[in-house]
């Protein structure tokens, strides 16, 4: 994975690498509104993620996910808050995103297998 200075740097590079769909979380789906696509947790994979903290305010925290879906033949970006302003949703989408972040940052025997 790359190491980006800013959220803008990350999204610009991901777009250059083909992650062009502008995705949003809407309850239990991730949506590409321009194509009227509504993906469930089983419809996409998380390829990469990057966390950012605001330079002047640690509460200003965001995360960028690069996701792909062979089912819908798309690659896109989700930008979401974490920490204080995070979505409290208990949906399968949030569970999948959280599980991926945790499992990618654990090492060896600590890493869950699913």
Image (cartoon, grey):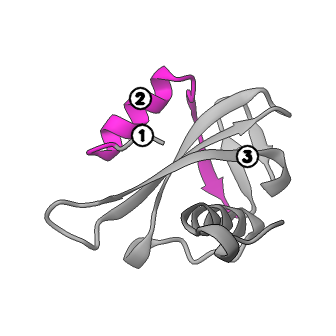
Q: Look at mark 2 in the image and give the residue it sits on.
A: 13
Q: Residue at x 81, y 31 (%)?
A: 72
Q: Which residues are magenta?
A: 4-27
Q: Which numbered circle lies on residue 45?
A: 3
Q: Look at mark 1 in the image and give the residue it sits on.
A: 2
> Quick check: 106 left or right of 90?
left
Dot placed on the residue nearer the N-terminal end, 2 or 3: 2
Q: Which numbered circle lies on residue 92?
A: none
The location of residue 100, given as percent across then percent down, is 65, 61
The location of residue 104, given as percent across then percent down, is 60, 60
- Measure the alpha-carbon separation of dots 2 and 3: 19 Å
**Residue mark closest to the camera, 2 vs 1:** 1
- Specify the quadrant that holds the C terminus: bottom right
Q: Residue at x 52, y 50 (%)?
A: 49
Which of these two is toward me, 35 or 63?
63
Give the residue at the far left of this rendering: 56
Residue 112: quadrant of the picture = bottom right
Question: CB of mark 1 within 8 Å of CB of mark 3?
Answer: no
The location of residue 23, given as percent across then percent down, is 60, 42
Q: Secondary structure at mark 1?
A: loop
The location of residue 77, given as percent across then percent down, is 55, 40
Dot placed on the residue nearer the N-terminal end, 1 or 3: 1
> Quick check: 65 left or right of 26?
left
Q: Report the label total.
A: 3
Question: Against 63, is 107 above or below?
Answer: below
Dot placed on the residue nearer the N-terminal end, 2 or 1: 1
**Residue mark closest to the camera, 1 vs 3:** 1
Is residue 81 located in the magenta-colored stretch of the structure?
no
Which of these two is toward me, 41 or 36?
41
Q: Residue at x 82, y 46 (%)?
A: 43
> Quick check: 64 left or right of 111?
left
Q: Secondary structure at mark 2?
A: helix
């Amino acid at each position: 994975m790359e190491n980006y200075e800013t959220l803008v740097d990350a999204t610009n590079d991901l777009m250059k690498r083909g992650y062009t769909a502008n995705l949003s979380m809407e309850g239990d789906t991730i949506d590409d509104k321009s194509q009227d696509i509504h993906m469930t947790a089983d419809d996409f994979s998380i390829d990469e993620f990057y966390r950012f903290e605001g330079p002047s305010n640690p509460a200003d925290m965001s995360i960028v996910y690069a996701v792909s879906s062979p089912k819908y033949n798309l690659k896109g970006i989700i930008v979401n808050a974490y920490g204080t302003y995070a979505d409290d949703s208990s949906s399968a989408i949030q569970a999948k995103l959280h599980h991926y972040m945790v499992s990618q940052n654990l090492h060896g025997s600590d890493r869950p297998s699913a």
